[in-house]
Image (cartoon, helix red, strand yellow):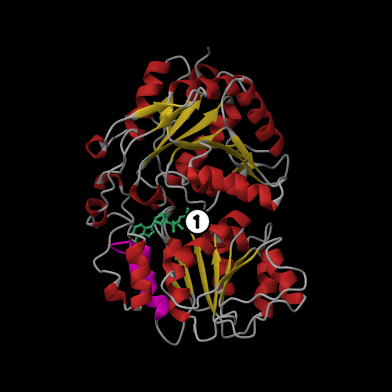
Amino acid sequence: MADLASRITKPEDAPAVSAPETAPETQIDGGEELGTGLVQSAFDVEIKLSDLQNDTESPLFSVSTFEELGLSKEINDGLLAMNFKKPSKVQERALPLMLSNPPRNMIAQSQSGTGKTGAFVLTVLSRVDLTKPTQPQALLLAPSRELARQIQGVVMNIGQFCKDLIVEAAIPGAIARDGAVKGSVVVGTPGTVIDLIRRKQFDVSQLKVLVIDEADNMLDQQGMGEQCVRVKALIPKSTQILLFSATFPDKVMTFAEKYAPNANQMKLRHTELTVKGISQMYMDCPDEQKKYEVLCKLYGLMTIGSSVIFVRTRQSANEIQRRMEADGHKVSVLHGAYEGGDRDALLDDFRTGRSKVLITTNVLARGIDVSSVSMVINYDIPMKGPPGKEEPDSETYLHRIGRTGRFGRVGVSISFVYDRRSYQALTQIANFYGIDLIQLSPDDWDETEKKVQDVIKSSRAKPDYAPSAVAKV
Ligand SMILES: Nc1ncnc2c1ncn2[C@@H]1O[C@H](COP(=O)(O)OP(=O)(O)OP(=O)(O)O)[C@@H](O)[C@H]1O
């Protein structure tokens, strides 16, 4: 099998090989054969956040408690029930700014899996007047139905002691054609929300807060930007606008600042964006066809909890599923060609661990929070732009790998490269974030297994995993 270095010239600044750091002291070991060719991880994880949350350099660090942030008793009880003991940095810093009066807009950036959802959900729950339970007062927009449903779940969980809280989903199929949106909090996708407002099923006249999660993606003019502009035009001018994401490319940030004028801001530099708990690796595959063999070998060898395989197209997702199933692996596939109900059931199966491997496209690259995910495979390096003018998609890379390593956990990402173009694309992404990638070779499976297992058998990142991110408010 040819070495990548012998096929292409490795640039000076190519990802360097480095040994993964581990946190073995947090692990209680174990493993269980599933008889599917895949091995289920049965690590009983001891979750110990306190070390990370006491480290000033960690995005999970904070000096205060939730009580000190002045939240209501009902909300604090909800946080307690969810075992949220201390706020993360984005929660501690952004909340006081978002809750102050008169309300001011906010643009907040924080690494993947560091509690942005909690930050805006706490704001929403603090702002709604529950004496008007069916009057929409807060609208939360997300790019996919899966993320909208997930956020709806978080609002309901944190708000479980808030009497009369009704949280509606405005996603395709959720509201009957002649029905009305009757909840104080509404979580939806932009197209459905616009339809509901236009058909007068959704009264937005009393909205106080608009949250846009994954805001760089949502406001991108190539994507849902136009729809978000239309939503803004339909709601009261006084609505407080909160924009959240792990990534804000400069171009989109300029637009975000217009969309949410005079906003308080929490920004990070590119080099502060990666989560150190995620060991980023790459697999040097001999050629494109062999990528599939490498994938099967990985799954045949490893003890992996849950994992996500990202591919470029729906067709290749289906094809990999067909081949993996024919080879005896149990996998699920989810992409935009599936109907809403099927998508919900597929993701629910993955969340509950009924299925352990999810093959998907960029539709699930952002926001999805399944803490048991210990490995992410970039089967195809994410690219953006029109055919012929494609360039590496650094933002999507970061969001994809961010499906693991959630809130201080550890995980592995493995990006497959097989030729000069894919190698250069990955190199460009690594340089953008200033990261060192760990090289894996399909010629040395003992070493590959060791490098991967050393990381995923541990549970939490050590405090010194955390990036040197200091949010500037
Ligand atoms: N203060 C906290 N204490 C403990 N766990 C928390 C806290 N805040 C959030 N979490 C948990 O951390 C995980 C990640 O949070 P969340 O999904 O909000 O991340 P995010 O920053 O929105 O990530 P992404 O950029 O991927 O959307 C969730 O499982 C959430 O329940």
Q: Measuring 65% from the left and 38% from the top, which residue is drawn there?
A: 312
Q: Measuring 61% from the left and 25% from the top, which residue is drawn there?
A: 324
Q: Which residue is mark 1?
A: 247
Percent position of residue 264, x then y: 44, 74
Percent position of residue 459, x then y: 32, 40
Quadrant in which residue 470 is drawn: bottom left
In the rendered view, tell whether residue 126 sits above or below residue 215: below
Percent position of residue 412, x then y: 42, 36
Percent position of residue 108, x then y: 45, 66
Q: Measuring 42% from the left and 43% from the top, which residue is drawn there?
A: 372
Nearest the eye: 196 or 286: 196
Quadrant in which residue 143 is drawn: bottom right
Residue 237 seen in render: yes
Query: Which segment is the magenta one?
Result: 84-99
Amino acid at the residue labelled 1: Thr
Q: Measuring 57% from the left and 36% from the top, which residue is drawn there?
A: 381
> Is-magenta flag for residue 94?
yes
Q: Quadrant of the C terminus?
A: bottom left
In this rendering, the count of numbered labels is 1
**Which residue appears farthest toward the top when viewing the image?**
1
Instruction: Indicate if the residue with disc 1 has its beta carbon within 8 Å of ligand 1.
Output: no
> Is-magenta flag for residue 36?
no
Q: Would residue 285 be found to the left or right of residue 334 on screen?
A: left
Magenta stretch, main secondary structure, is: helix
Query: Disc 1 on helix, strand or loop?
Result: loop
